[in-house]
Image (cartoon, helix red, strand yellow):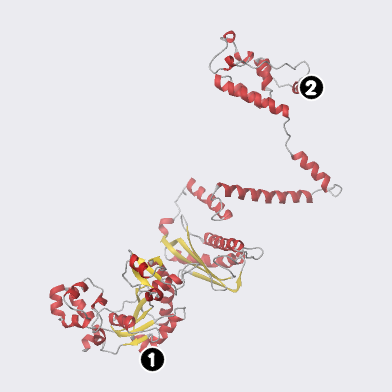
Amino acid sequence: MTGDARALAPRTLVVWVPDWPVVALSRDGDDPLEASLPIAIFAKGAVVACSSAARAEGVRRGQRRRDAQARCPHLEVVDDDPVRDHRAFAPLIAAVEEAAPGVQVIQPGLLTLRAKGPARFYGGEASAATVLAGTVAAHGIDDVRVAVADGAFTAEQAARRGTRASDPVRIVPLGAAGAFLSPLPVAVLDDDTVSLFARLGVQTLGAVAELGPDRLGERFGARGERLYALASGHDPRPVQARTPPPELHREVVFEPPVSLADQIAFGLRVPAEQFTGRLGDQGLVCTELRVVLTGEHGERSERVWLHPDAFDAAAIVDRVRWQLAEQGASGRRGGGAGGGGGSGLRGGAGLRSAVTSVRIEPEGVDAAAHHTARLFGSGPEERVHHALSRVQAMLGHQGGAHPRDRRRAVARRAAAAGSVGGSAQRGSRGRGQRGSGAGRRSAVARQPARASSHDRVRRGSAGRGARRRRRHGGRRRAGRSHRRAGVDHSRSRRGAGAATAGRRPVGGALARRRAGVGCHARPPRAPLSDRRRRPGRVAPRLRGGRLDGRGEV
C-alpha cells in the first residue's frame, strides 16, 4: 500500500463487546435476567441480538419472532431499548476515556479510537489493546474483543471475525487490510447493494474490490466509490472523537454501609444540592430523575421518578426516602426486619442488605428558561401545587391514591394524636386524684348523650311529617327554624297554632311535655285516613283555610 493509501486509512483501535443489548439487559434493573439464559432482543419483529445460549439453539440475527421461537420454544423475548443500551454503556466509555482519550462511539457496545497515541503510551499496539481490554473487563464484562487495523471498517471486522473469547486481541499488520478483508462475505458491507452483488455473482469483498473504483462509480456513483474503499481496506473515514459530556450525576458511597433511611437522606442533602447546582450551571433543570441504590451484597434498586415541574434538592431527598420506604415495605412483607428509627432494607425483592451507595442521575432534562417563575407568580395554581407537594411529602408517593387509603391514613394519625393527647392529660392530673376513677368520670362526661326510645319514635314521626310537608308544599322555612329551636314537631304541628309553635317551652313545662303529663300534654291525634294522605288532595272541610295551625294534609 502506498503512502497516500496509508494516509487515507489511519491505524484504528476498536473495542467491541459481543451481544451488548443482552449484556445491558443483564446489568439493568432491580431483577435483571441472567445472560446465560436463551434471550433474544427484538426490534420491529426481527432479532437484533441474542445470547450465546439462544445462538446454540439456532436463533440468528434477522429471524422473525415466529421462526426464533420455533427453534427455541423457551426463548426469552425482550423488546429493544436503545436508551437502556446507551445508559449501561456509559460507564464503560468513561473508563476507556480515562485510559485513552479521544473515543468515538459507533453504537452501544462498539467504540473506536486512534491507535497511535495509546500505542506510544503503552509501548505498542498489542500492549494498548491488552490494557483497554482489561479496563473494560474490570467492570464485570466477561467477553471483550479488541482489534487494531488500517481504518475503522477493517478494525471492526477484525474484532468481530478475527477474535475469540480465548484470544480477544487481533492486530492486522500495516498494509494487510485488503488481504484480511478479501475472503469475507459481501454481506458485511451492510448496504442496499448487497442483494444486487449476490445476483451478479459477487460473493466476497475481494470480488467487489476487483471491479475497480471506475466501474463501481459509474454504476452506483459516490456510493460505489465508498464501497470500493471499504472492500479494498482504504477506509478514508477518520476517528471523530467525542466531547465528553459534563458530569451531571452524583454518587454517594457509605462506608460502613447504612441501613437507616434517615442517615441516607441526611448524607444525600449536600450531593443533591450539588446535583441541582451543576444542572443550573449548564442552564438545565431535571424533570426525570433516576435513583440507583446498591446493597452490601451487590443487589440494586433502580427507579425513574418524574416531576411535574423540576426537581430541587428537597424533592430529590424525598424521592430517595420513598424508594427506601418501598424497599422497607417489601422487606417487611418478605419477613425481614429493619433497624429502629428508619426503614428496614432486608427481605423481599430489591435490597436485602444495608445500602453502600446511592447514585442520582438526570434521566430527562429541560431548559431552565422554560421553568422560571413568573413575575407575579402563577396565582392559585402555584398555591395548589405547593399544598399538594407538602401533602405528598408527608404521605409519600403512594399515600392518598385511594379514598380508602386516605381514610386509613387519617385514622392512624388521629389515633396517634389521641394517644399522645391522652397520655398528656394523664400526666397533667393532680397527685391526689386517682387515675382510674377520674379517667372513667372524664370519659363518661365526654360521651354524647344517647337518645331514648321515646325520642327516637317522635323523631320518626317528625320525619314522616317532613315528607308529607315536602309533598304538599308546607312551610319549610318555619319547620327548619322549629327544628333548630328544639321544638317537639309531632305535637306543635298537630295541636298548636303558629304562634305557640314558635315558642320554646322551658323548665318544668318542657319536662312535663316530654313526659306526656300536665297542662301542656295533649293526646295524639288519630292518624289521617288514606283519602286525606293522598298527595295533592286537600280535605273538603279544610279547603281554603289555614293549614299550618289545623294540621297537615
For image coordinates 21% across by 77% down, the residue present is 227
The answer to whether residue 553 is above or below residue 222 is above
454 left or right of 239? right
| Picture quadrant where residue 467 is located | top right
Viewer-closest of 276 and 517: 517
Residue situated furthest bottom in the rendering: 123
For image coordinates 70% across by 17% down, the residue present is 524
The answer to whether residue 261 is above or below residue 185 is above
Viewer-closest of 116 and 462: 462
Q: What element does badge 2 sit on? A: helix
Residue 86 in the image: x percent, y percent? 40, 70
Q: Which mark is residue 508?
A: 2
Give the residue type at disc 1: Gly
Give the residue type at disc 2: Gly
Q: Quadrant of the C terminus?
A: top right
Residue that label 1 marks = 123
Q: Which mark is residue 446?
A: none
Q: Earlier in the sequence, mark 2 or mark 1?
A: 1
Residue 536 in the image: x percent, y percent? 53, 17
